Amino acid sequence: MITAAQQSDWLLHHLSQSAGNLPGRGLAWLENLRREAARSVAQLPVLNRKQESWRYTSIDSLLQQRFITAGADIGGLENLDISRWMLPGLDAYRLVLVNGRCLPSPASSADLPEGVVLGSLRTALATDPDRLSAWFVRNSGRSDNLFTALNSALINDGALLHVGTDVVLDKPIEILHLHLGHERPLLVQPRNLLVLEPGSGVTLVERAIGADSSAAFHNHLTEIYLSAGASLDHYRLQDENQRSHHLCTLFLSQQEQSRYRGTHLSFGGVWARTDCHALLQQPGGECEINGLYTVGDEQLKDIHLRVHHAAPRCTSRERFKGILHGEGRAVFDGHIIVDRGAQGSDAQLRNDNLMLTRSAEVDTKPQLEIYADDVKCSHGTTVGEVDPAQLFYLRSRGIDKAQALSMLSLGFAAEISNGIRLNALRSYLAQRLARKLGGQTDASGMDSGNV
Amino acid sequence: MLSIKELRVSIEQKSILNGLNLEIGSGEVHAIMGPNGSGKSTLSQVLAGREDYLVSGGEVLFDGLDLLALETEERAHAGLFLGMQYPVELPGVNNMTFIRESLNALRRARGEPELDAADFLRRVREQAQLVGLDQALLKRGVNEGFSGGEKKRNEILQMAMLQPKLAILDETDSGLDIDALRVIAGGVNGLRAADRSIIVITHYQRLLDYIEPDRVHVLVGGRIVRSGDKQLALELEQRGYGWLDEAAA
């Protein structure tokens, strides 16, 4: 058990070791932001299992490691061949981050349409700090826990996407977060900012993967602003190695009639946590967050959703499915809040879990907190095993048990995977899942689009 | 082809089959009839390898193999097929993928190469048309939202694709209208061959108007109490099963 003092010591250690090399010195707003965050690190209550959102999550294994801060130097990486890490078959504009630092734009981003900026936050701090300050100011007060504070205190680099008014991209964007090993475990803290101006539309694929099996703590913080009528189709794939800790904190705010459609896929890591905060700030917003997670031995998946209906007539749909095997553990904590003034809200929250073994465990807790009276809200959760009759049916047709289980699991996941609108990602997912779930062939139970 | 000797089976300590004997030769079609609860479905499930049952005695030879020693999927590899009375739904498992994987599993087990995708597609579409299964249902989840009749057609389609040596059809006729019955019977008759045997389990003589059996057996109380030719089925239709109870006692 890690004590409060050890926790503070861990944080201060990581805070102090990287002070030197941060960009944007002399930008008052940024210095302020970092200073406030650093102060929060010292003042915020330590994380412990008495806090509701950390009740089922032990971070001891994380805090027992010391990391060195990544990202001071990307020298020598200019010539890194990143093509083999790209999503095969996806024609996209691309941005690549290695250990949290953006590589100079690959050629595929050169032809970005007018009105679109896709690049490095660090670069923008040097070239266009005023615009960034306008977006960052909205962020104030969001260092709500120690890890977000740690990210804010050390803002260095990350992905920056700005899509101008009424620009609808003709191709998806892929942002690749690649982890390259180092002799010591790395602390990787990209700070990502996605701003969609009114009426714009983008499909974004974000993938967090590792090039090797070295340990790291990935502490992502992503802010998404959807202006009136903007639309974002956001795919997020977390698939780092088994020694990685991954925390993604996502702040989403939506203006009038904007649309967010998220698909969050999480397979890797020893501990992978998603903290997703969605704020429906103005009327008529639509927020859909779908998710699929798998966990096996020595893995913990930790999903926390907080969807806040702060304005009337918004719709939210959250649907997460989990496949648990071995001694895998998962936590699902979904929370919908409907403010007093948010009449006509329509919210649904679902979490379904398929347990392939008796030794797997899930703690699932959907919650509704409703202060308006004219709303349509529901939540539901299930935890079930494979139906022996289904297994028998497949086996009676000659399909062995391992493949049958894999097919049934893929079938269970199909509700999420079939909702993926990019063929390249859907087939990648089918193969990835079949491999992870130990199928003998690439037999996908899901329609991979070519049948 | 199939030789069952003194088979005894129970489930949850309730004895269901009590020394059942049955011999089925190559190329033959046998009908098994009998009242509710007589053990017909238990017999078919045990032969296919359902694990919920306890076999406490007897033996089953299938083509010389000790059938009861095989895993469920190995029985399929050996050429056994069970057309289920209540085919389950497999949500999200694509029907076409399912049939292809199943066919390829059998081919791999026999040391044959997997079927070429185009060949498979052509064959499955052809067969679906023959059994009257809407092509759109090939792209859906297995049996997902299918009507009762569609599920049964899907069973016959699988049988036609897998070309088993021994097909057991467990009440394939239940819940079918007369047109569906004809189509299904047509599918079964199309599979009749010198090296293939078929067991048809049914409550009703009606199906046997379309699938003419070589032998008819009556199962009562977990044993075959009478066997005969197709005339026996007609007799059962007229007299019911009661007279056999008396005869058996």
Image: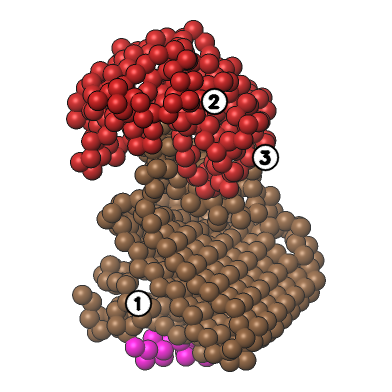
Chain colours: A brown, B red
Label 3 neighbour load within 10 Å: few <14, some 14-19, many 20+? few
The numbered mark 1 sits on a residue in which chain? A
Residue sitting at x 37%, y 16%: B227
Q: CA distance from mark 2 to mark 1?
A: 63 Å
Residue nearest the observer in this picture, B50 or A251 = B50
Label 1 neighbour load within 10 Å: few <14, some 14-19, many 20+? some
Q: Left or right: where does residue A280 sit relative to residue A324?
A: right
Q: Position of residue B195 (x, y in %)?
A: 46, 9
Q: Nearer the viewer, mark 2 or mark 3?
A: 2
Q: CA distance from mark 3 to mark 1?
A: 47 Å
Q: Which residue is mark 1?
A: A54
On the question of residue A11 being in view, the answer is no
Q: Nearer the viewer, mark 2 or mark 1?
A: 2
Please state the extent of the stretch shown in magenta in the rendering.
A30-45
State which quadrant residue A105 falls in: bottom right
Q: Quadrant of the N terminus of chain A?
A: bottom left
Q: Evaluate if marks 2 and 3 touch, with contact meaning CB atoms under 8 Å apart.
A: no
Please report whichever mark, 2 or 3, sits nearer to the chain's N-terminal start.
Answer: 3
Residue nearest the observer in this picture, A25 or A59 = A59
Task: Tell me if residue A244 comes above or below residue A430 in the rendering.
Answer: below
Q: Is residue A43 magenta?
A: yes
Q: Which residue is mark 2?
A: B207
Given the image, on which type of amino acid does mark 1 rest? Trp
Residue sitting at x 63%, y 66%: A261
The numbered mark 3 sits on a residue in which chain? B
Q: Position of residue A59 (x, y in %)?
A: 31, 72
Q: Which residue is mark 3?
A: B136
Task: Tell me if residue B39 comes above or below residue A96 in the rendering.
Answer: above
Given the image, on which type of amino acid does mark 3 rest? Ala
